[in-house]
Image (spheres, helix red, strand yellow):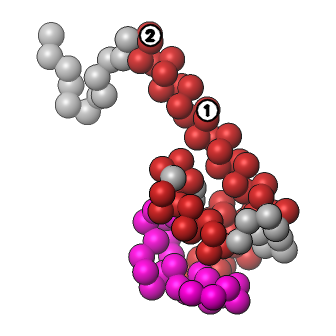
């Protein structure tokens, strides 16, 4: 029987386990990055540079990144995204050059 084009191919138990492990590792890396941002151990320019080379960090949502900054809550983060013209679903890897510059300027970081 042919697989429906709307469903992903079935995974073997080993493939499923490997995918789950990779997803858990990605969540852990993103959580560590957000914690470092919150603690001030990681700057926005450094984070954006890291996202250019690290696939797991590149998948971090911009909204989640903003919420991790000290003094920025959920409401203010959404307002900032709206004011900057950035979608709430945008990920770090998807930031264009102008969007990246506006985010950095908003927080007084050098471009």
> Which circle marks residue 13 in the picture?
2
Image position of 109 (left or right of 102): right
Q: Is residue 97 visible?
A: yes
Q: Earlier in the sequence, mark 2 or mark 1?
A: 2
Q: Is residue 73 visible?
A: no
Q: Is residue 91 above or below residue 99?
A: above
The residue lying at 79 percent from left, 64 percent from top is 41
Q: Is residue 20 above or below residue 80?
A: above
Q: Secondary structure at mark 2?
A: helix
Q: Position of residue 10 (x, y in %)?
A: 32, 17
> Which circle marks residue 24 in the picture?
1
Q: Position of residue 103 (x, y in %)?
A: 59, 81
Is 99 in front, or is 53?
Answer: 53
Q: Is residue 59 above or below residue 25?
A: below
Rounded to the nearest angstrom, the CA distance separating label 2 from label 1 is: 16 Å
Magenta-drawn stretch contains 95: yes
What residue span does the magenta drawing correspond to? 86-111
Image position of 55 (left or right of 44): left
The residue lying at 44 percent from left, 12 percent from top is 14
Q: Secondary structure at mark 1?
A: helix
Residue 4 picture quarter: top left
Q: Position of residue 53 (x, y in %)?
A: 48, 57
Q: In the picture, which quadrant includes the C terminus?
A: bottom right
> Which circle marks residue 4 in the picture?
none
The residue lying at 66 percent from left, 60 percent from top is 64
Q: In the picture, which quadrant includes the N terminus?
A: top left
Magenta-drawn stretch contains 93: yes
User: What is the crowding at mark 1: few (fewer than 14 residues within 10 Å), some, or many (at least 20)?
Assistant: few
Image position of 107 (left or right of 70): left
């Amino acid at each position: 029987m042919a697989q429906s084009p709307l469903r992903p191919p079935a995974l073997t138990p080993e493939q499923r386990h490997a995918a789950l492990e990779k997803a858990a590792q990605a969540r852990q890396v993103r959580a560590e990055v957000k914690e470092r941002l919150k603690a001030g151990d990681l700057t926005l320019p450094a984070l954006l540079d890291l996202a250019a080379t690290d696939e797991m960090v590149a998948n971090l949502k911009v909204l989640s990144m903003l919420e991790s900054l000290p003094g920025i809550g959920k409401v203010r983060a959404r307002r900032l995204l709206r004011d900057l013209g950035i979608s709430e679903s945008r990920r770090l890897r998807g930031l264009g050059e102008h969007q990246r510059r506006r985010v950095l300027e908003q927080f007084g970081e050098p471009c």
